[in-house]
Image (cartoon, grey):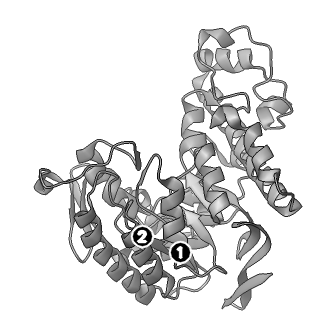
Amino acid sequence: MTITTKFIKNKLVFFKIKNKFGKARTGVISTPHGEIKTPNFAFVATHGFIKSLDDKEHKLAAPELTISNTFHLYVTGKVNEVKKVGGLHKRFKIKNPIMTDSGGFQVFSLGWGKIHKIGKISSTILLSTSNVDSSKNPVKITSNGAVFTYDGKKYALDPKKSIKIQEDLGADIIFAFDECTSPLHDYEYNKKSLIKTHKWAAECLKAKKKNGQMLFGIVQGGIYEDLRKESSQAIGEMSFDGFGIGGSFGEKQMGKVIEWALSGLPEDKPKHLLGIGAIEDIFIGVRKGIDTFDCVIPTREARHGALYSKVGKLDIKKGLFAKDRKSVERGCECFACAKGLKRKDFHLLFKTDKEKAQKLATLHNIFFYKTLFAKIREAINSGKKNALDKLEKEYRELI
């Protein structure tokens, strides 16, 4: 059993590894707002709350971890409001531990992501970006930070400012400011970007003043083995409380990139995979030693009528579900399924009361993911050779 300890406001905050099977492991991250059993999933609460849910419904969902967005809280002017009342937990009456990202993902999503018209994961790898006009990037990236053009206004973020905002938001786990590169960026771009990310990481550590928060450094380097290993070694040698694996991936390179990114990190500190949450990728990450994940997938897809089930993802708005009396997921104990709602009921609600339908669908998908992670922890803790394999087969229709 491995324990990392740190005193924060006279409270012992630690990460404890409970069991291991291969590289997969279970553990506990203790925070001022409760324990996070790992592996686990952070549901996205961009503006401080999970979209479609109110206070009452958030309690029903009972997420064990959420992640809020530094950039969006900053540009909407909510940071001061949150700070005045004592942080995100008090402002939104949230009991669970909270993460905040640094704004580094928006350096990509609002910049190169728009230029390349692509997300974090791509099946296409660009060999050269020399023909791309960087002057058209809506985000101006310098060695010191980034300037965003958002809703016609200019907003600047740098390591010091990102840390200050995250301290004001009061999350339990915060992340260093970095540059998330595009999956279409070539080797040379990633190499130059890495210099900035490592410089910013050191500046974030220096800027952090507030106790009661764990600061995670971020490993970058794109799809390139030597850059990922270089970044892992450099970030791993810094005095972070935990680590995030950031950046972009090719569809077939997830496992290798994670392995390279973990290669230089201390084993006894928690590892988080940023922005990744497809079922297949969760199993890949868990097997490599990832402790926590975050992604918009379960809640965003719920709002669009995609309900998760081990028999497959159901596009409940399709006509074939209009008379379907089966449960969305057999044995599901989410609020909606426990009340007896069937597939036909969800289908009708998306036609007649979209807001209610989105709430119930969100509650269902959150419960589905929570159940999946509970089963993953159970499989690892069992110590049985094929436990994870058998569990993955249960979810094969979603992979």
Residue 308 in the image: x percent, y percent? 68, 33
For label 2, the crowd category at 10 Å Cα-Cα, with few meaning under 14, some 14 to 19 and many 20 or more, is many
From this viewpoint, which residue is outermost toward the front?
385
Residue 163 in the image: x percent, y percent? 43, 77
**Considering only order in the chain, which callout, 2 or 1, is on the residue closer to the N terminus?**
2
Q: Residue at x 77, y 52 (%)?
A: 388
Which quarter shows the N terminus? bottom right
Answer whether residue 274 is visible to the viewer in this image.
yes
Q: Residue at x 67, y 66 (%)?
A: 97
Instruction: Tell me the kind of residue under disc 2.
Output: Arg
Q: Is residue 31 above or below residue 57?
A: below
Q: Nearer the viewer, residue 392 or 219?
A: 392
Residue 146 in the image: x percent, y percent? 26, 67
Q: Is residue 389 above or below residue 35?
A: above
Numbered tag placed on residue 298 in the rendering = none
Query: Which residue position holds label 2?
Result: 228
Q: Is residue 30 above or below residue 39?
A: below
Q: Quadrant of residue 107?
A: bottom left
Q: Are marks 1 and 2 in contact (CB under 8 Å)?
A: yes
For label 1, the crowd category at 10 Å Cα-Cα, with few meaning under 14, some 14 to 19 and many 20 or more, is some
* 54 left or right of 117 in image: right
Q: Residue at x 42, y 70 (%)?
A: 228
Query: Which residue position holds label 1?
Result: 263
Q: CA distance from mark 1 to mark 2?
A: 9 Å
